[in-house]
Image: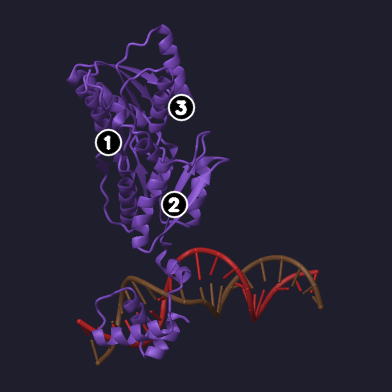
Chain colours: A purple, B brown, C red
Amino acid sequence: MKIKDIAKIADVSVATVSRVLNGANNVSNETKEKVLKVINKYDYKPDKIATSLRRKRTGMYAVIFSVKGGRVLEDTYSTKFLKGVLNFFSKKGLKLIVDIHEHGNILEYYKDIIKSKIVDGFILLDIRKNDERVELLNKENFPYVVIGRNNENNFVFVDSDNVSGAYMAIKHLSQIKCKKILYISGNKGIPVSDQRLVGVKNAESDLKVQVDVQYADFDEQKTVEILKSILKKGFDYDGIFCASDLMAYSAMKFLQGLDIKIPIVGYDNIPLSEFVGLTTVDQNIAKIGYSAAQAVHSLANNEDAVSLVVPSKLIKRKSTLNFNF
DNA sequence: GCTCTATAAACGCTGCCTGT
DNA sequence: ACAGGCAGCGTTTATAGAGC
């Protein structure tokens, strides 16, 4: 069953059926009803391939995860994010391609997708400084939205407010009378870490607390190693802030094993943090995903899209309660 | 007859143009 | 304002024609 058949049965032109299908306003209610009746009777669905051919758009978008030795799609950050993205796309009848780039040249991989036109746009994850994907997509004038920011920001982005998120964490520790705080950061030099460090530093000077920074690359084992080496020299911190919940959890377990009681704040609000009672910063990942999907869809349809910073929220739990020294 | 190349038609749909 | 006609989207497949 195709549009031509519907037109014939409904006794209208093919163009009229197309107008009805696409909700054009220049069709009389009478004609619209007549056409819809036939469409419903035969359960007609427009051919997506033909529509794409004509519109030069597929209604599909892509999110590409990269494998860089770490975990991919095994964390709740990814699933919460994808849920937000899909929430928007499914509402609009659009489709999402989720892929993992593992081998070969990343630019060739993106070029291939751009040239073959299988998607209308990208949502970029793990943005780097001077990211080569950005350069390529700008050159090709291909629609995309970035999750996060970098040193250039010559693109539309949706980012979590890492600066205020980190600030809130330190502020909370300061409010429970911590004076000397250990901040265990993620990878040095990547945008997320830079932004959180800004928040930490702002809080440090505003709130008159001391914060020492160590880098553990978002790695649980490295977090423990750092604690071990500090303990050797004498541990005099009265609060710990970690750049992820997993890091915070491993720090918590390790110090508990040594019978050291100290307030700890994590980041991300993964389900584990609720389970173990970890105070943490919630980034509202689902909203970030939803907004990014909305923005890339606008761009693909030649509409404007504005960048957005989504506020974070501190979730207080028992890892920082009852510590009023 | 066979192989190779050039051209046309086909796929289903939508947007522009035209007519009432 | 409403509705019909038709080009054209990009690629594959069919057909015609040329050369051997």
Q: Chain of mark 1?
A: A
* Earlier residue among tags 3 and 1: 3
Q: Chain of mark 3?
A: A
Is residue A289 positioned above or below A188 on the image? below
Is residue A39 positioned above or below A208 on the image? below
Q: Residue A284 in the image: x percent, y percent?
A: 30, 43
Asked whether A49 or A64 is in front, the reply is: A64
Q: Nearer the viewer, mark 2 or mark 1?
A: 1
Label 3 sits on what residue type? Glu
Is residue A63 positioned above or below A251 on the image? below
Q: Give the residue at x 24% y 28%.
A: A167
Q: Are marks 2 and 1 on the same chain?
A: yes
CA gap between label 2 and label 1 equals 32 Å
Q: Give the residue at x 37% y 38%.
A: A275
Q: Which residue is mark 1?
A: A315
Label 2 sits on what residue type? Ala
Element assignment for label 2: strand
Q: Which residue is mark 2?
A: A62
**Mark identifier at residue A220:** 3
**Mark identifier at residue A27:** none
Q: Chain of mark 2?
A: A
| Residue A52 image-quadrant placement | bottom left
Element assignment for label 1: strand
Q: How many marks?
A: 3
Apparent side of residue A10 relative to residue A321 in the rendered image (left or right): right
